[in-house]
């Protein structure tokens, strides 16, 4: 019994030691993680309900910052598609499980409202540099708002209702994950209202939006090819081995 107890204690200590050694590692596209480099994008696609609310306010949308791509389609006189694709600037990974804990992107969209009776007094709102917390299911952003809002960093804007697809990077390959059912926080709603100067009709249209859209994360992990030593390197290694052998022979005599 004493032996069994000691074994249990030793096993528990080993597990605790392993847990203690695990750490969250933040990597950028130029870094190597476990023999891999990772690049990717995060694409935010506005929901139909959000597009309708933007139509009510006759709000203009323009790209902001360094985007990988943007689609803003109102060719029919109303919005049919709004998407912003931003490059991933960093990933925070649990080095014990290879689970992606957070992902950050750069670039976003600016919404601009002109005075419209009962809808808005006018204003602007930029949502950029998303930071997605996959564990807490939260989306943070930098907000640049008009009407006295100013710049808000690491602002909790949306909550994520559902995550589908892989959330670990386990080897070379492409990993596509969708984050859907984005619901706005109360602070986010209030910031939208103030920044865009929304009045009763504009505020009412925004209140009907329960799903703001979908974020699609695409991460491509590529194996790093080890550098092949130059022939001169092999020659130096050979000379070193010969030197070691001669020194060992002298000591033996």
Image (spheres, rainbow, N blue to C red):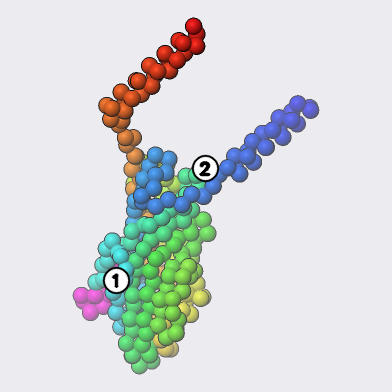
For the point 67% across and 37% down, the residue is 13
Indicate whether 31 appears above or below 128: above
Q: Which residue extends farthest bottom?
A: 117
Corner quadrant of residue 123: bottom left
* Lateral position of residue 28 relative to residue 69, left or right: right
The reply to whether residue 138 is in sight is yes
* Lateral position of residue 169 relative to residue 109, left or right: right
On the image, the x and y values in percent for residue 160 come to 47, 63
Q: Which residue extends farthest right?
A: 2
| Local secondary structure at mark 2 | loop
Q: CA distance from mark 1 to mark 2?
A: 38 Å
Q: Earlier in the sequence, mark 1 or mark 2?
A: 1
Q: Nearer the viewer, residue 44 or 18?
A: 18
Q: Nearer the viewer, residue 160 or 86?
A: 86
Of helix, strand and loop, which mostly describes the magenta segment?
A: loop
For the point 49% across and 63% down, the residue is 138
Q: Check disc 2: other Cα within 10 Å, few if <14, some if 14-19, many if 20+.
A: few
Which mark, by number, is residue 96? Answer: 2
Q: Check disc 1: other Cα within 10 Å, few if <14, some if 14-19, many if 20+.
A: many
Q: Which residue is mark 1?
A: 63
| Local secondary structure at mark 1 | strand
* Lateral position of residue 137 relative to residue 218, left or right: right
On the image, the x and y values in percent for residue 172 come to 36, 41
On the image, the x and y values in percent for residue 140 come to 46, 66
Q: Is residue 250 magenta?
A: no
For the point 30% across and 83% down, the residue is 58
Q: Nearer the viewer, residue 42 or 148?
A: 148
On the image, the x and y values in percent for residue 188 come to 47, 75
For the point 45% across and 10% down, the residue is 249
Report the span colored magenta: 74-83
Corner quadrant of residue 117: bottom left
């Amino acid at each position: 019994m004493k032996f069994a107890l000691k074994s249990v204690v030793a096993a528990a200590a080993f597990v605790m030691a392993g847990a203690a050694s695990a750490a969250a590692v933040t990597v950028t596209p130029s870094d190597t993680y476990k023999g891999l480099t990772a690049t990717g994008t995060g694409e935010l696609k506005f929901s139909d309900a959000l597009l309708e609310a933007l139509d009510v306010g006759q709000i203009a949308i323009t790209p902001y910052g360094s985007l990988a791509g943007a689609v803003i389609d109102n060719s029919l006189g109303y919005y049919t598609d709004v998407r912003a694709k931003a490059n991933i600037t960093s990933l925070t990974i649990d080095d014990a499980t290879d689970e992606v804990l957070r992902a950050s992107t750069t670039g976003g969209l600016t919404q601009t409202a002109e005075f419209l009776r009962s809808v808005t007094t006018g204003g602007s709102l930029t949502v950029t540099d998303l930071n997605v917390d996959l564990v807490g299911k939260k989306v943070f952003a930098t907000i640049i708002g008009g009407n006295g809002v100013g710049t808000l960093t690491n602002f909790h804007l949306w909550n994520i209702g559902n995550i589908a697809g892989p959330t670990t990077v386990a080897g070379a390959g492409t990993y596509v994950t969708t984050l859907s059912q984005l619901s706005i926080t109360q602070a986010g709603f209030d910031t939208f209202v103030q920044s865009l100067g929304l009045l009763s009709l504009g505020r009412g249209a925004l209140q009907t939006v329960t799903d703001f859209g979908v974020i699609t994360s695409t991460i491509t992990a590529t194996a790093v090819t080890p550098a092949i030593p130059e022939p001169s390197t092999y020659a130096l290694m050979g000379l070193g081995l010969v030197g070691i052998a001669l020194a060992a022979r002298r000591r033996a005599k």
